[in-house]
């Protein structure tokens, strides 16, 4: 009699587990051998140089915030190169960055920083 009372809770637990619907049962993940897809990141930026003035527009189509900065290298050795303050570009957001040299512009680029 004592043996059957100690087996009763175990039998009841086994019956409950076996009666669970298939969707409620945990399943093991199967590795398909492919590397995980990279997360998409980075605002698309376009720049325009008119004389000594630079304007850049950056649009972020992704979920993660992109911190963008405008960098301007001036052509003359005595002209000071400039970097804009960082601007957080949230999802579906477009920002405008601008800067200038005193004389000619040698090169312009945008840097991106992921907040995560």
Image (spheres, grey):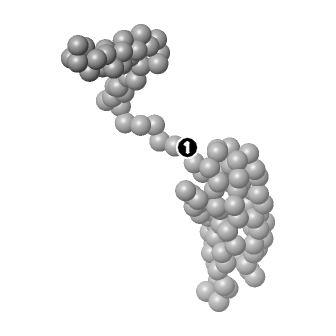
Q: Position of residue 44 (x, y in %)?
A: 66, 50
Q: Identify which residue is drawn at 67% across, 68% down.
A: 86
Q: Say which element carries label 1.
A: loop
Q: Quadrant of residue 111?
A: bottom right
Rendered image quadrant of residue 73: bottom right
For this view, does 21 lie left or right of residue 18? right
Relative to 73, say whether 112 is above or below.
Answer: above
The front one of 80 and 65 is: 65
Q: Is residue 115 visible?
A: yes
Vertical comparison of 115 with 63: above or below: below
Closer to the camera in the image, 97 or 55 = 97
Query: Which quarter of the image is occupied by the C terminus?
Result: bottom right
Q: Position of residue 65 (x, y in %)?
A: 65, 54
Q: Is residue 28 above or below residue 116?
A: above
- Disc 1 marks which residue? 40
| Residue at 64% from the left image edge and 80% from the top image edge | 81
Question: Where's the N terminus, which quadrant?
Answer: top left
- The answer to whether residue 7 is left or right of residue 18 is left
Q: How many marks?
A: 1
Please name whichever residue, 15 or 70, is drawn nearer the observer in this view of the structure: 15
Q: Is residue 99 left or right of residue 38?
A: right
Seen at 57% across and 48% down, the residue is 41
Residue 48, image x and y in percent? 74, 60
Q: Residue furthest front?
A: 1
């Amino acid at each position: 009699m004592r043996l059957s009372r100690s087996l009763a809770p175990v039998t009841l637990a086994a019956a409950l587990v076996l009666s669970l619907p298939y969707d409620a049962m945990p399943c093991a993940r199967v590795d398909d051998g492919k590397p995980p897809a990279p997360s998409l990141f980075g605002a698309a930026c376009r720049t325009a140089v008119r004389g000594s003035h630079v304007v850049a527009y950056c649009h972020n189509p992704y979920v993660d915030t992109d911190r963008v900065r405008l960098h301007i290298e001036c052509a003359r050795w005595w002209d000071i190169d400039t970097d804009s303050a960082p601007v957080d570009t949230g999802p579906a957001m477009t920002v405008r960055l601008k800067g200038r040299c005193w004389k000619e512009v040698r090169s312009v680029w945008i840097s991106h920083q992921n907040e995560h």
